[in-house]
Amino acid sequence: MKMNKIGNTCIKYLCAGVAGCRAQKLWRNPSTSPFQGLSDGELQKCFCAQPPLHLLNKNIVHLFLFFFTIVLLLLTGCTNVENKEIRDRSGRTVVIKNQINRVISTAPSNTEIIVDIGQADKLVAIDKHSANVSGIPADLQGKLPLLDFFYPDAEVIINLSPDLIIASGHNPSGSGEDPFRLISEMGVPVVYISMSKSIEDIYLDIKFIAEVLKAGEEGEKLVRLMRSQVDEIARKAAGIENKQTVYFEISAAPDMMTFGKDSFISDMISVISAINVFGNDNWLVTPGAEAVIARNPGVILTNVNYIDNPIAEIKNRPGFNHISAVQNNRVYQIDTDSSVRPSARVVFALRQMQEAVYPGIGTQEPRINAD
């Protein structure tokens, strides 16, 4: 027991790099030590005193230097201000530069947010659908490379030397394949803004992008402004008791599409105190004509802009003459971009929707087909 106690004491000094070779020898083979008869205090005094440097075991010196070097490397890594680890809006962990100066936006909603928080000067490329985003500085208009939304050119991206790519949950193709996987593996950080399920999600998207671009204050201001406008719209409809039923179409026949629960468009319908007729269906819904007729919406909204006269097309569909919205001429066109891009600009579409569903309650006149 005495030997173990002394050995433990001496080994403590060994780890500190100050014990002599005699203490090491004793620790290695205490049973043959010539000092077995010494008291604890004598052993400590004898073996744990610091000897001159030239008597130190070289292996111990090397071991000490090795651990010292490791500690320095760890400290250097811990204090590296070049990079930081973040969790993006899709839940992925990404290491990005602490200071972002060169940004690629691959979705118009992200581009709108970047512009609206005053960070457009950091853009070095955008996707093709962002070409019409208002607010891009004049010196950049028409000069930024336009990338394919689903199939971005890796060579173009690498040559631009971006600090960060801000991608969208919509970017993966129909197969679900990540179009930026190889680019990310080549060392270009990619953060994803997942598909917003609510207006609250849009607030969080804005804050996230703002914080990443070191524009947190601007992001907070934009969220406060947007929230106040959404709250104002909601207050105007708060007293409505007989809520209108709404079918919001985002793709025309024969490939009709709408949004159900867990979508920001369905949330927008709720904000104006209306009821989404497909609000209990999961996210992206592809209803047949029979399903729309059966649910008999009181109002039909469409943001389709790729066919001529989408309102007339809806009214002339077989069987749609039995729908209340068609019978009462309550089919309305809503701005496409502001209703499908989850950014602060959805407020424009929200006002249009409110005025269409409850005429006179809002301030923004929707475009109504006079047919």
Image (tube, rainbow, N blue to C red):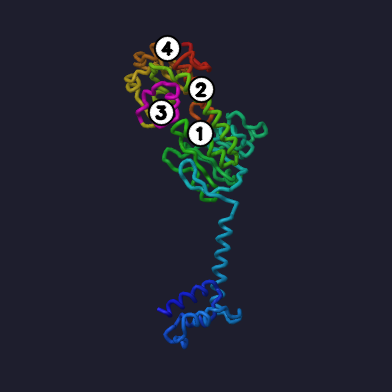
**Looking at the image, is mark 2 or mark 3 earlier in the sequence?**
2
- The residue to which callout 4 is attached is 329
Q: Residue 191: percent from the left, percent from the top? A: 51, 43
- The answer to whether 70 is drawn above or below residue 91 in the figure is below
- The answer to whether 32 is drawn above or below residue 294 in the figure is below
Q: Residue at x 62, y 32 (%)?
A: 136
C-alpha span from label 1 to label 4: 35 Å
258 inside magenta stretch: yes
Question: Taking the image as drawn, is residue 207 in sight?
Answer: yes
- The residue to which callout 1 is attached is 203
C-alpha span from label 3 to label 4: 22 Å
Question: Taking the image as drawn, is residue 337 in sight?
Answer: no
Mark 2 or mark 3: which is in front? 2
Taking depth in this image into account, of 11 and 98 the one nearest to the observer is 11
Locate the N terminus and report the quarter of the image it occupies.
bottom left
Looking at the rendered structure, which numbered label has been put on residue 232?
2
- The residue to which callout 3 is attached is 259
Disc 2 marks a residue whose amino acid type is Glu
Q: Secondary structure at mark 2?
A: helix
- The magenta stretch is 257-281
Q: Secondary structure at mark 1?
A: helix
**Looking at the image, is mark 1 or mark 4 earlier in the sequence?**
1
